[in-house]
């Protein structure tokens, strides 16, 4: 009888890409799927997956884990085995580095491979992942805001000079050659970024068939004549993608467009249509979506001040009072709705306090996730959120909006294909041996509105490169994850 490193038996094996599902034993050898068979095989290590689904490990291309090992284990709890970090321009580290350091140090075990130290390159960091190990496989995007700092464009509100832009492009190219999957942008956090700068950096990503992943300049409904809406932010990056021939990835699209709006505004429908039209014109645009109807303004009060001070205008426009829209997310006033008096007090006492904005609607989030070009990304970083489990569990069983295979595709094969991860997101002979083994009846992702309490249930085993990192629902102290590197084709 053939003997393998690892055998997973008695489970329902699903390969979402081929829509193949069946009762097979999986044999793993040297970190790869070696066989799928109904004949008897044995393993040095064996997992009995009776009553469970054996799926490819979830692939999460929108994260901010960025070398945080504790966050890597949070990904394992979510069933994620491969992640891309460095999203949204890496804004967290330099928008207000001191405040962010403070926030991160509040976390226990903040065991960091610091991705964004300016004296190091992304290439060094990829090497560190390989030499030190990581809970999951991890790839990187080169953040445009970090590129700006490396090139000396220190003011996020000012355009980069021609020389700085040339230097940013040079570093971006070198980073992609070293394995980055492209360039990420947080245009909202770098208001000085011009169309020229976007097109130039999109062009670098395009030269290597890499991704331009963008958190757009504007989100939400806006206010006509005062604040542009998400549609303006999306049009800007679609135009840049057209000019540069780039592969555009719109980040957390529901958090731009899944807002309640008046029928004639209908932000969600128009946002989706805009992407459909761009695709019909041959622009390579897709999106990731966090299935959470909440907008947490992570970077604190200064960024939200404009928004909060806008509320009276919004109320005037809607013709009604908006109450309980902005909530305090941390500190002594945690959980309270923001009032003008409380706003002034917090601004005085601790101006980096994170706030949560309650304006999104879950049925609009689901609508946004429906198209084939949209898939799941968790946006996890210093908050943790069971995105995949919610879609594969709750959205399949309770909302009935996807079949199990469709939901799995949006969490495995589709993101893997988008980032050119040829051996990820599949269960097939030769694929990397990354698995998430769960109970389809109990898999669920739950969270409070503030997402400060989030939980995944129903996941029994998570296996990375043939090595269990979760077994019978318990985390194991092992770091089998490797770096993932972009290979231009
Ligand atoms: Zn973002």
Image (spheres, rainbow, N blue to C red):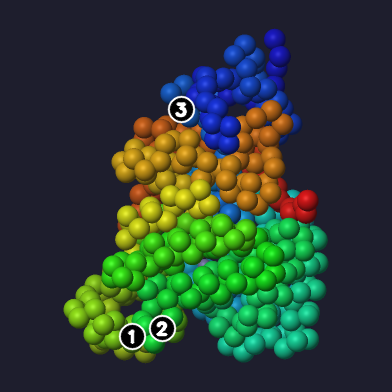
Between residues 6 and 268, which one lies in front from this camera angle?
268
Where, by quadrant of the figure, is residue 90 drawn?
Answer: bottom right
Query: Along the horizontal axis of the image, is 410 left or right of 44?
Result: left
Number of the label disc, if any, that sits on residue 169: none
How crowded pointer 1 is (Cα within 10 Å; few <14, some 14-19, many 20+) is rated as some
Where, by quadrant of the figure, is residue 296 drawn?
Answer: bottom left
Element assignment for label 1: helix
Mark closer to the observer (3, 2): 2
Residue assigned mark 2: 227
Residue assigned mark 3: 52
Residue at image position (54%, 31%) is: 19
Q: Residue furthest left?
A: 320
Is the residue marked 2 within 8 Å of ligand 1, measured from its CB?
Answer: no
Which quarter of the rendering shows the N terminus?
top right
Between residues 199 and 392, which one lies in front from this camera angle?
199
Query: Along the horizontal axis of the image, is 54 left or right of 440?
Result: right
Residue assigned mark 1: 310
Image location (x, y in percent) of residue 278: 56, 62
Q: Is mark 3 in CB contact (under 8 Å) with mark 2?
A: no
Q: Is mark 1 in CB contact (under 8 Å) with mark 2?
A: yes
Element assignment for label 3: loop
The disc, 3 or 2, on the residue closer to the chain's N-terminal end is 3
Real-space CA distance between mark 1 and mark 2, rounded to the nearest whole angstrom: 9 Å
| Residue 130 seen in render | yes
Residue at image position (44%, 52%) is: 369
The disc, 1 or 3, on the residue closer to the chain's N-terminal end is 3
């Amino acid at each position: 009888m053939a003997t393998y490193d690892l055998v997973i038996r008695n489970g329902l094996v699903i390969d979402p890409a081929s829509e193949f599902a069946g009762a097979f034993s999986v044999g793993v050898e040297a970190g790869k799927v070696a066989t799928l068979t109904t004949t008897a095989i044995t393993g040095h290590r064996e997992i009995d997956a009776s009553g469970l689904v054996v799926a490819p490990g979830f692939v999460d291309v929108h994260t901010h884990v960025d070398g945080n090992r504790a966050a890597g284990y949070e990904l394992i709890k979510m069933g994620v085995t491969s992640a891309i970090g460095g999203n949204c321009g890496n804004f967290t580290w330099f928008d207000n580095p001191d405040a962010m350091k403070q926030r991160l140090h509040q976390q226990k075990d903040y065991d960091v491979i610091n991705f964004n130290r300016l004296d190091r390159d992304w290439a060094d960091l990829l090497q560190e992942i390989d030499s030190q190990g990581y809970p999951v496989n991890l790839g990187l995007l080169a953040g445009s805001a970090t590129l700006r700092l490396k090139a000396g464009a220190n003011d996020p509100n000012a355009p980069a000079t021609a020389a700085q832009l040339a230097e940013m492009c040079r570093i971006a190219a070198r980073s992609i050659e070293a394995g980055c999957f492209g360039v990420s942008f947080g245009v909202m956090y770098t208001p000085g970024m011009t169309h020229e700068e976007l097109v130039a950096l999109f062009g670098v990503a395009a030269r290597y068939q890499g991704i331009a992943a963008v958190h757009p300049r504007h989100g939400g409904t806006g206010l006509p004549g005062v604040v542009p809406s998400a549609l303006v932010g999306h049009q800007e990056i679609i135009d840049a993608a057209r000019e540069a021939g780039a592969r555009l990835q719109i980040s957390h699209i529901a958090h731009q467009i899944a807002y309640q709006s008046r029928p004639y505004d209908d932000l969600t429908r128009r946002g989706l249509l805009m992407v459909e039209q761009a695709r019909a014109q041959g622009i390579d645009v897709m999106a990731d979506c966090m299935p959470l109807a909440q907008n947490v303004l992570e970077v604190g009060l200064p960024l939200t001040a404009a928004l909060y001070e806008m509320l009276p205008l919004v109320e005037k426009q809607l013709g009604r009072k908006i109450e309980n829209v902005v909530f305090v997310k941390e500190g002594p006033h945690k959980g309270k709705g923001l009032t003008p008096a409380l706003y002034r007090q917090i601004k005085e006492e601790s101006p980096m306090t994170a706030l949560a904005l309650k304006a999104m609607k879950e049925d609009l989030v689901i609508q946004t996730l429906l198209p084939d070009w949209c898939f799941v990304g968790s946006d996890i970083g210093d908050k943790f959120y069971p995105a995949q489990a919610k879609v594969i569990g709750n959205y399949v069983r309770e909302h009935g909006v996807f079949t199990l295979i469709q939901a799995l595709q949006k969490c495995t094969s589709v993101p893997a294909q988008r980032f050119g991860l040829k051996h990820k997101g599949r269960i097939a002979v030769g694929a990397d041996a990354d698995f998430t083994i769960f109970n389809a009846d109990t898999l669920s992702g739950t969270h409070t509105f503030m997402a400060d309490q989030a939980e995944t249930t129903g996941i029994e085993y998570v296996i990375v490169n043939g090595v269990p990192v979760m077994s019978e629902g318990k985390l194991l102290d092992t770091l089998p994850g490797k770096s993932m590197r972009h290979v231009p084709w």
